[in-house]
Image (spheres, rainbow, N blue to C red):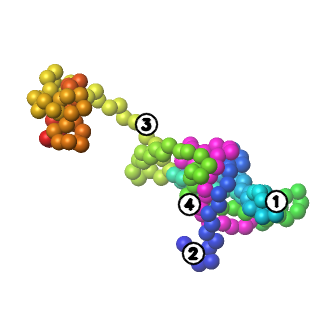
Amino acid sequence: MAYNESRVTVCGNVASGIAHSKARTGYSRASFRLFTAERRWDGEQRAWVDGDQMFLSVTCWRALADNVHASLDKGDPVVVSGRMTIKEVEWEGKPRQVLDIEATSVGPNLALCTSITTRPRRTPGVVGARAAPEPERPEPAPVAAEAPALPKARRSGGAAAVREGEPALVRADDTARPKEVAEAPL
């Protein structure tokens, strides 16, 4: 982090589609617009009221760009953290200022939605690589037809236990369980 760098965290909604591309350097780049609005309590009206609204541009690089492109869509509630800059641009012949965040992290706002997290597999030595396809897994080895003999209390279908309050480890119908589970130490 540099001196006088403006680090911000902003909660809002994705206001545009995710634009995904490769820069001339070969790195992945994703960008989108972020909408955020202030909500504040008005004591006189005794209700929440809308405050100021703001649109920002968000830029992501490398693996973050790939993951943002794969995970987010327009309208999703997000939390964006990164370095904020103000860019001077000319629009319709007039100079304007555009707020831009170069994101270091982007995630769903779990106060407003739910999420299922998955971790992509990375290829070592390759920058900006997409997740590798899942390898085919071999079929499990067949399990012996007979389960080892266990004390009667442990094979009673889960209702009885060796000691009071202790759940049974193996039920009578668990003969098809893998060996390491069926032979749990007693």
Residue most toward the right? 93
Residue annotated with mark 1: 45
Badge 2: few (under 14), some or many (20 or more) residues near its Cα, within 10 Å?
few
For marks 1 and 3, give the CA distance: 56 Å
What residue is at 43 percent from the left and 40 percent from the top?
132
Amino acid beneath label 3: Pro
Q: Mark 1 against mark 3, which lies toward the viewer?
A: 1
> First in sequence: mark 4 or mark 2?
2
Which residue carries the number 4 mark? 104
| Disc 2 to disc 1: CB gap under 8 Å | no
Q: Residue tagged by mark 3? A: 133
Query: Sequence order check: which comes first, mark 1 or mark 3?
Result: 1
Residue at image position (16%, 39%) is 162
- Residue type of the residue flagged with mark 1: Gln
Residue 53 lies left or right of residue 23; in this view the side is right
Q: How far is disc 4 from disc 3 in space, using C-alphas?
A: 26 Å
* Residue 173, picture quadrant: top left
Residue 177 location in percent, x, y? Answer: 23, 29
Question: Which residue is nearer to you in this view: 102 or 157?
Answer: 157
- Labels 2 and 3 touching (C-beta < 8 A): no
Q: Is residue 58 visible?
A: yes
User: Mark 4 or mark 3, which is nearer to you?
Assistant: 4
